[in-house]
Amino acid sequence: MGANSTVNYYGTGYTEGTKRYISDKLRGGKGMSFPTGINKKTGGFVSSNTGITKVKDALHQLLKTERGERVMLPKFGCNLKKFMFQPLDSKTFGQIKEEVLTSCNNYLEGATVKKLSVLKGSDVGKFGESSIHILLILQLNDEAETVFSEEIVVQ
C-alpha cells in the first residue's frame, strides 16, 4: 500500500519550477547522472536524473568503487575485486552478499534491497569469463513502492 501522494502548497507565489523542486525532494530528490558528461538536451556539462535511474546510477557507483578510493569518504564502496581470486564457492558468495548489503545499507539512498543473488560468470552462460554477477531486486522508497532489478558485473 503506497503512501499519500498529494502535495499541499501553503502560501502564495510558488512558481511551477519551485513546485517541481518540492515534489522531487519528496520523491527522493535528484542525483547527478553517472558517468558524467555533456547533457545533450540542455547543453550543460552535468545532467541529473531521478527515480529508478538515480538509484541505478548510485548503485553502480557504490559497488564499482573500491573502499578507500574516495578521499573524503574512505569507507564508501565495496571491495569486490578481492573476491575475483578466491574460490567462488558458497562461503565466498556469502562474504560478497555481506559486503554488498553492508554498503547498500550505509550509502544507498532511495531504495531498499529486497533480494540479492551472486553468480559466477560461467553460471550465466559466460564460459571462460572470470567474472562475478550480482543480481539485485530493489524497492524504491517512494509512494508507489516501485520494484525493479539491476545486474552488476565485476571483472
Image: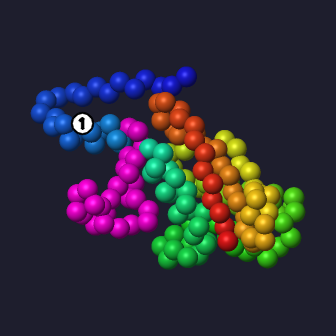
Q: Which type of secondary structure does the marked residue at label 1 adopt?
A: helix
In this rendered view, identify the residue nearer to me: 134 or 97: 134
In this rendered view, identify the residue nearer to me: 33 or 2: 33
Residue at 60% x, 63% y: name it.
63
Residue 132 placement, left or right of 34: right
Q: In the rendered structure, which segment of residues is drawn in magenta?
A: 26-50
127 in relation to 17, above or below: below
Q: Which residue is mark 1?
A: 19
**Residue 124, position as x, y percentages in the image:** 75, 57
Residue at 24% x, 28% y: name it.
9
Q: Quadrant of the N terminus?
A: top right
Colour scheme of the picture: rainbow
The chief SS type of the magenta part is loop
In this rendered view, identify the residue nearer to me: 55 or 75: 55
Residue 117 placement, left or right of 2: right
Residue 22 placement, left or right of 14: right
Three-letter amino acid code of the residue under disc 1: Lys
Classify residue 76 by image quadrant: bottom right
**Residue 129, position as x, y percentages in the image:** 74, 70
Residue at 65% x, 49% y: name it.
136
Residue at 20% x, 41% y: name it.
17
**Residue 137, position as x, y percentages in the image:** 64, 44
Is 33 one of the magenta-colored residues?
Answer: yes
- Asked whether the viewer can see residue 114, the reply is yes
Is 43 one of the magenta-colored residues?
Answer: yes
Residue 143 placement, left or right of 85: left
**Residue 91, position as x, y percentages in the image:** 87, 61
146 in relation to 41, above or below: above
Q: Quadrant of the C terminus?
A: bottom right
- Asked whether the viewer can see residue 83, the reply is no
How packed mark 1 is, by other alpha carbons closer than 10 Å (few <14, some 14-19, many 20 or more), is some
2 in relation to 40, above or below: above
